[in-house]
Each structure stands twice: as structure tokens, then as C-alpha cells.
């Protein structure tokens, strides 16, 4: 896989990218992620990333942000 070049503005997106590649964003056993949906805050920050197998919700990643716009945490909700 080629290395991705990240700018300062992209630091939060790098954390999201890394979370998706880690176990926090792995599909449950015997399931496959076939669709995602995104929900945004009023401030244009990613609020939720929902994963589905067809129409079945598998899990949600919830994002919280610091006042300075940096990513604070990513929480997985089953």
C-alpha cells in the first residue's frame, strides 16, 4: 500500500483513516461492511460513521472534537 501524505489540516482524517484500518472498525465476525453513511455536525465535522451489511446496521463510530477543531475521540457503538 502506498504511503499517504497528510497535511496539518488532515491530522483528524489521518486518525479516522487509522481507526478504520484498526480493530475499532472491523466488521463483526461473519459480517461484511457493504455500505457506510456519514453524519456531520453543524460545524462541518464528522459526527457519526455508520456501517451496514446491506440494510443491517453493524456498528457506529462516534467522533468528538476539541474546541480547536482537533479530533478528541472515536467511540464504537454496537
Image (cartoon, helix red, strand yellow):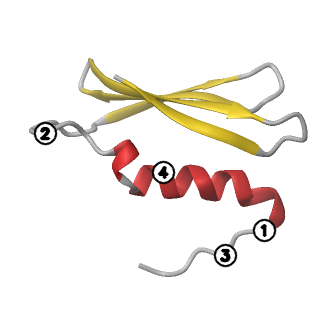
**CB of mark 3 within 8 Å of CB of mark 1?**
yes
Quadrant location of the C terminus in the rendered image: top left
**Mark whose residue sits in front, 4 or 1:** 4
Residue occupied by mark 3: 5
Q: Earlier along the polypeptide chain: callout 4 or callout 1?
A: 1
Image location of residue 14, percent across then percent down: 62, 59
The residue sitting at 44% across, 50% down in the picture is 20
The residue sitting at 81% across, 36% down in the picture is 66
**Mark whose residue sits in front, 2 or 3:** 2
The residue sitting at 78% across, 68% down in the picture is 7
Residue occupied by mark 4: 19
Q: Earlier along the polypeptide chain: callout 2 or callout 1?
A: 1
The residue sitting at 70% across, 69% down in the picture is 6
Q: What secondary structure is found at the residue carrying circle 3?
A: loop
Q: Is residue 44 left or right of residue 23?
A: right
Q: Earlier along the polypeptide chain: callout 2 or callout 3?
A: 3
Q: Residues within 10 Å of mark 3 (few under 14, many from 20)?
A: few
The dot on residue 29 is 2
Q: CA distance from mark 2 to mark 3?
A: 32 Å
Q: Residues within 10 Å of mark 4 (few under 14, many from 20)?
A: some
Q: What secondary structure is found at the residue carrying circle 2?
A: loop
Q: Residues within 10 Å of mark 2 (few under 14, many from 20)?
A: few
Q: CA distance from mark 2 to mark 1?
A: 35 Å
The dot on residue 7 is 1
**CB of mark 4 within 8 Å of CB of mark 1?**
no
**CB of mark 3 within 8 Å of CB of mark 4?**
no
Amino acid at each position: 500500500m502506498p504511503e499517504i501524505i497528510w497535511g496539518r489540516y488532515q491530522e483528524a482524517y489521518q486518525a479516522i483513516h487509522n481507526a478504520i484500518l484498526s480493530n475499532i472498525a472491523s466488521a463483526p465476525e461473519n459480517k461484511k461492511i457493504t455500505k457506510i453513511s456519514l453524519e456531520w455536525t453543524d460545524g462541518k465535522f464528522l459526527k457519526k460513521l455508520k456501517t451496514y451489511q446491506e440494510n443491517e446496521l453493524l456498528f457506529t463510530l462516534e467522533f468528538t472534537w476539541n474546541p480547536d477543531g482537533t479530533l478528541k475521540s472515536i467511540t464504537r457503538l454496537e
